Image (tube, rainbow, N blue to C red):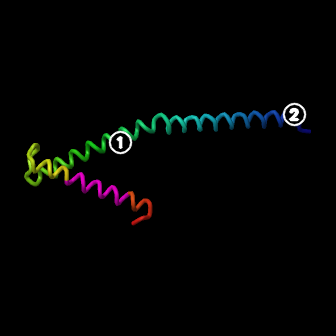
Amino acid sequence: MVDTAFVTSTQARYRLLYLTFAAALAAGGLWAALIEGPAMRASTQQQLDHEFTAENLGFCEKFGMRSGASEFLTCIQELAIIRQRQADRDRAAELGIL
C-alpha cells in the first residue's frame, strides 16, 4: 500500500521546485528585457550609425567628392534623404500599407 501523505508531500516538493524554476526564468527574462534591452539597442544603433557614415563617405568619395567639399556635404544630405525614404517604406510595408 502506498503512503498517500508521502506521495502528496513529494508532489508538493516537485511543484515548488517547478514554480521556483519558472520564477527564476521569468526574472531572467524581465532583467534581459528591461535592463539589457535598452543598452543592446543603443549599441546596435551606434554601430548602425557608424556603418552608415562609412558607407556615405565611401559612396561620395567614389564619385570624386572629397570630404569637406560642398559637393560632399550635398551628397551626404541626399543619401540621408534616400535612407529616410527607404526606412519610411519599410515601416509602411510592416504595417501593411504598401
Instruction: Give the x, y percent position of residue 25.
Output: 59, 37
**Direction from residue 39 to residue 60 in the image, left or right:** left
Instruction: Give the x, y percent position of residue 37.
Output: 45, 39
Q: Which mark is residue 89?
A: none
Q: In which quadrant is the N terminus drawn? A: top right
Image-quadrant location for residue 91:
bottom left
Please report the residue visible at 14 percent of the width from the left and 47 percent of the height from the top: 73
Label 2 packing within 10 angstroms: few (<14), some (14-19), many (20+): few
Q: Which mark is residue 44?
A: 1
Q: Which residues are magenta?
A: 78-90
**Direction from residue 73 to residue 86 in the image, left or right:** right
Please report the residue visible at 26 percent of the width from the left and 42 percent of the height from the top: 50
Classify mark 2: helix, strand or loop.
helix
Residue 88 forms part of the magenta stretch: yes
Instruction: Give the x, y percent position of residue 54.
Output: 21, 45
* Kind of residue at disc 2: Ala
Q: Main secondary structure of the magenta part?
A: helix
Q: Residue furthest right?
A: 1
On the image, numbered disc 2 is attached to which residue? 5
Instruction: Give the x, y percent position of residue 66.
Output: 8, 46
